[in-house]
């Protein structure tokens, strides 16, 4: 980047390389799609696989990029997929040094795995969140060196000798990280994770069936998302772009109640300056990953606007055909469907820049 200084104007000659990607067709773009390295595949495949699949198949799908994944993308009209490391990935590593080393390794391996087909694949960075300044630096490195499109964080960073120090990115020390994401103008995706063992024992021993996407993902992650909202992150970083999956982790259905009861706390030192619902129209985007429910999509289009909703699948925890078959059935105008399936992502990820 070269700055030419004159008394009157600052001109930035930005050497932004035009991104090569498959924009030949009108296919869809998906952005909450999991991949992992062999070291993490066992922890990533504790989820129940899609019907008819074994855990071994789920693991093979998590490790694959260029074979069955790409074949399914071709078959179902997906032009471009953004890959990220399946949960918990780095957020499941309590030791800061190990976490930082693995974050770099995951990012470099993903970059090299997709380097020969950036027409079809992009990446979100994995970051160790033990050290917010180092996370900011690694995000910048992956954007500059690897052309990554943002970051995906798997909820809180576990930490401490027994894993029970949970780091939430709504604290002021993370401002250095949010500032970097805002400066780079790349989105940060907050994705759920399975809880540390102690939380599982306390809250889910009575019914382990409600862990994960049944209930625990939404409950746990919505606390983190609302913490980021309430603690004023979007007031301090008004241009920050933030993505949540699974149709908003249930928050939009509660925005009336949230607004009412959070606004009652303004006199109690609430850092947030607007209503919670406002940030869902200015900073937050949501995807349809793993939540293929047309009535709910309609409700969300009313509550926060269809222009803030992006199609995604959550492959390989859901099948690509299930996602795209659902997309085909949604009763939207051709223009709105193109926006949902493709154009919203092009704009948010700046794919045409
Ligand atoms: C672009 O994506 C479509 C699927 O929508 C695929 O059939 C086509 O081969 C892709 N083109 C390139 C150049 O990768
Ligand atoms: C990229 O490399 C992988 C692994 O070597 C290979 O399977 C795939 O066919 C390559 N893709 C392209 C487009 O060259
Ligand atoms: C990001 O990294 C680039 C390349 O190393 C550097 O020029 C730039 O100053 C960094 N940006 C920030 C905000 O630190
Ligand atoms: C802490 O987490 C690691 C990795 O998730 C696990 O191997 C270890 O057993 C955990 N320790 C405790 C005390 O739960
Ligand atoms: C926030 O929501 C409350 C409750 O709905 C409402 O009374 C108030 O006017 C709203 N404030 C702003 C700034 O929109």
Image (cartoon, helix red, strand yellow):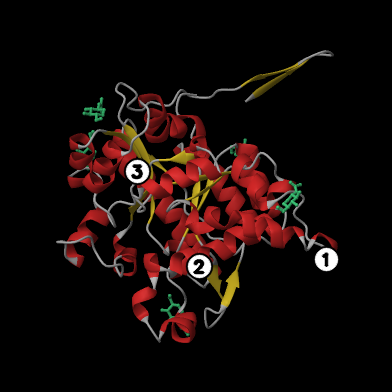
Q: Circle 2 sits on which residue? A: 219
Q: Which mark is residue 304?
A: none
Instruction: Judge by depth and name the residue closer to the eye, 41 or 203.
Output: 203
Q: CA distance from mark 2 to mark 1?
A: 25 Å
Q: Circle 1 sits on which residue? A: 268
> Contact (CB < 8 A) between labels 3 and 1?
no
Sequence-wise first label, 2 or 1? 2
**Front: mark 3 or 1:** 1
Rendered residue at 37%/58% (across/down):
86
Sequence-wise first label, 3 or 1? 3
Label 3 neighbour load within 10 Å: few <14, some 14-19, many 20+ = few
Left or right, residue 284 beside residue 322: right
Q: Circle 3 sits on which residue? A: 112
Work out whether 117 lies above or below 353.
Answer: below
Sequence-wise first label, 2 or 3? 3
Q: CA distance from mark 2 to mark 3?
A: 35 Å
Pinpoint residue 16: horizontal percent, then vertical percent: 53, 24
SS label for mark 1: helix
Residue 182 seen in render: yes
Instruction: Judge by depth and name the residue closer to the eye, 157 or 105.
Output: 157
Rendered residue at 29%/23% (across/down):
25
Q: CA distance from mark 3 to mark 1?
A: 50 Å
**Front: mark 2 or 3:** 2
Rendered residue at 60%/68% (across/down):
167
SS label for mark 2: helix
Left or right, residue 202 beside residue 64: right
Left or right, residue 186 beside residue 330: right
Left or right, residue 308 beside residue 29: right
Q: Any atom of ligand 2 within 8 Å of the CB at mark 3? A: no
Pinpoint residue 143: horizontal percent, then vertical percent: 51, 39
């Amino acid at each position: 980047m070269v700055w030419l200084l004159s008394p009157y104007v600052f001109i930035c000659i930005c050497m932004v390389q035009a991104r090569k990607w498959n924009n030949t067709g009108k296919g869809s773009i998906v952005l909450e799609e999991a991949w992992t390295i062999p070291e993490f595949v066992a922890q990533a495949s504790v989820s129940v696989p899609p019907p008819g699949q074994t855990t071994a198949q789920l693991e093979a799908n998590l490790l694959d990029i260029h074979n069955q994944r790409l074949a399914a993308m071709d078959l179902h009209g997906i032009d471009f997929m953004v890959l990220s490391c399946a949960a918990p990935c780095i957020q499941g590593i309590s030791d800061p040094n190990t976490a930082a080393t693995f974050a770099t390794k995951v990012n470099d391996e993903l970059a090299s795995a997709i380097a020969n087909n950036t027409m079809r694949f992009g990446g979100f960075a994995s970051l160790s969140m033990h050290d917010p300044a180092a996370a900011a630096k690694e995000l910048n490195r992956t954007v500059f060196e690897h052309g990554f499109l943002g970051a995906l964080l798997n909820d809180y960073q576990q930490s401490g000798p027994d894993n029970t120090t949970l780091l939430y990115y709504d604290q002021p020390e993370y401002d250095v990280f949010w500032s970097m994401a805002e400066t780079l103008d790349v989105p940060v995706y907050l994705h759920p994770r399975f809880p540390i063992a102690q939380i599982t024992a306390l809250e889910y021993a009575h019914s382990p069936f409600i862990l994960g996407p049944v209930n625990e993902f939404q409950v746990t992650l919505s606390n983190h998302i609302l913490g980021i909202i309430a603690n004023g992150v979007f007031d301090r970083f008004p241009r920050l772009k933030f993505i949540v999956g699974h149709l908003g982790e249930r928050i939009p259905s509660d925005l009336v109640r949230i607004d009412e009861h959070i606004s009652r706390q303004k006199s109690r030192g609430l850092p947030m300056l607007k209503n919670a619902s406002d940030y869902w129209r200015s900073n937050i985007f949501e995807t349809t990953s793993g939540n293929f429910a047309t009535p709910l999509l309609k409700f969300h289009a009313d509550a926060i606007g269809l222009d803030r909703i992006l199609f995604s699948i959550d492959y390989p925890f859901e099948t690509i055909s299930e996602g795209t078959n659902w997309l085909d059935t949604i009763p939207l105008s051709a223009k709105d469907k193109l926006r949902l399936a493709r154009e919203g992502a092009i704009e948010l990820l700046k794919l045409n820049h």
